[in-house]
């Protein structure tokens, strides 16, 4: 796909670029209800949509369709973003854009995964099998990346693109004490942050959580990270992240009863 993608007459190669400070100031106007600021903020962040569409390696009308779907995710991200959480807008928006496009792909079988993306996925699967023979532990994405020389983010994206439909309750890991289901691996892109952060009672409940549990909930349900990403960032196992997350949700439920 070329670097130029047009949608509704917009040439993304000529989009404005904003500094972080400009972005924050503009977001304040957006949250204050300024429709012109919102329109400009959307235009200034269309490159985020383009960057996600680029990952699929599609061309022509399919790319345009995906770009438009990604714009829906961008606007949802703008509407639900909380600038007070000290998280970059791009960090929050990309998972939501990606989520919208993935849902579109699941519902539209005519959009096919590119050959290059499939090649990456197959190489990753072969590497995973080879590494599994050398160790009893499941190889991590970073280990597969090191083995193949392919960037970890590209491996993750390619494997997601070719995955078959499965149940979210399917177990994918068990350390003898805790079973991790597929649902635990999926980043939240369904506006869960809106349910958590816009409800004052839940905000009060979050305040009583220990710092570690509070950090995990922020990363999982606001930033949209998977449990694997959280575990790598804070330096504990995914099973521990799962236990702490479930404990935090239990505390919140008890607080609200």
Image (cartoon, helix red, strand yellow):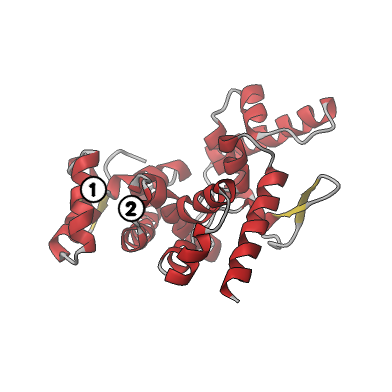
Can you name the residue that lies furthest to the left here?
36
- Residue at the image position 31 percent from the left and 58 percent from the top: 78
Q: Can residue 234 be seen in this view?
A: yes
Q: Name the residue under label 2.
A: 84
Crowd band around label 1 with a 10 angstrom C-alpha radius: few (<14), some (14–19), many (20+): some
Can you name the residue that lies furthest to the bottom here?
257
Q: Which of marks 1 and 2 is nearer the N terminus?
A: 1
**Secondary element at tag 1:** helix
- Residue at the image position 46 percent from the left and 61 percent from the top: 193
Taking 223 as reference, is 176 left or right? right
Q: Residue 24, which numbered label?
A: 1
Q: Can residue 110 be seen in this view?
A: no
- Image x and y of residue 74, in percent: 34, 57
Taking 14 as reference, is 123 left or right? right
- Image x and y of residue 110, in percent: 51, 60
- Residue at the image position 60 percent from the left and 77 percent from the top: 257
Tell me the mark number nearer the camera, choosing from 1 and 2: 2
Crowd band around label 2 with a 10 angstrom C-alpha radius: few (<14), some (14–19), many (20+): few
């Amino acid at each position: 796909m070329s670097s130029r993608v047009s949608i509704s007459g917009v040439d993304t190669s000529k989009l404005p670029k904003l500094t972080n400070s400009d972005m924050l100031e503009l977001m304040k106007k957006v949250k204050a209800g300024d429709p012109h600021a919102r329109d400009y903020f959307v235009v200034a962040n269309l490159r985020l949509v383009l960057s996600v569409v680029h990952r699929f390696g599609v061309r022509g009308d399919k790319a345009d369709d995906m770009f438009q779907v990604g714009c829906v995710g961008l606007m949802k991200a703008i509407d639900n973003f909380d600038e007070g959480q000290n998280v970059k807008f791009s960090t929050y928006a990309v998972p939501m854009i990606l989520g919208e496009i993935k849902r579109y792909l699941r519902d539209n079988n005519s959009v096919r995964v590119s050959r290059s993306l499939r090649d990456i996925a197959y190489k990753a699967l072969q590497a995973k099998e080879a590494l599994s023979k050398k160790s009893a532990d499941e190889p991590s994405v970073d280990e597969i990346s090191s083995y193949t020389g392919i960037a970890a983010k590209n491996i993750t994206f390619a494997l997601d693109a070719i995955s078959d439909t499965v149940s979210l309750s399917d177990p994918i890991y068990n350390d003898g004490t805790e079973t991790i289901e597929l649902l635990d691996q999926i980043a939240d892109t369904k506006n869960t942050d809106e349910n958590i952060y816009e409800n004052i009672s839940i905000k009060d409940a979050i305040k009583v959580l220990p710092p570690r549990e509070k950090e995990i909930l922020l990363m999982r349900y606001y930033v949209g990270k998977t449990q694997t990403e959280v575990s790598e960032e804070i330096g504990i196992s995914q099973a521990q992240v799962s236990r702490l997350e479930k404990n935090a949700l239990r505390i919140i439920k008890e607080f609200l009863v």
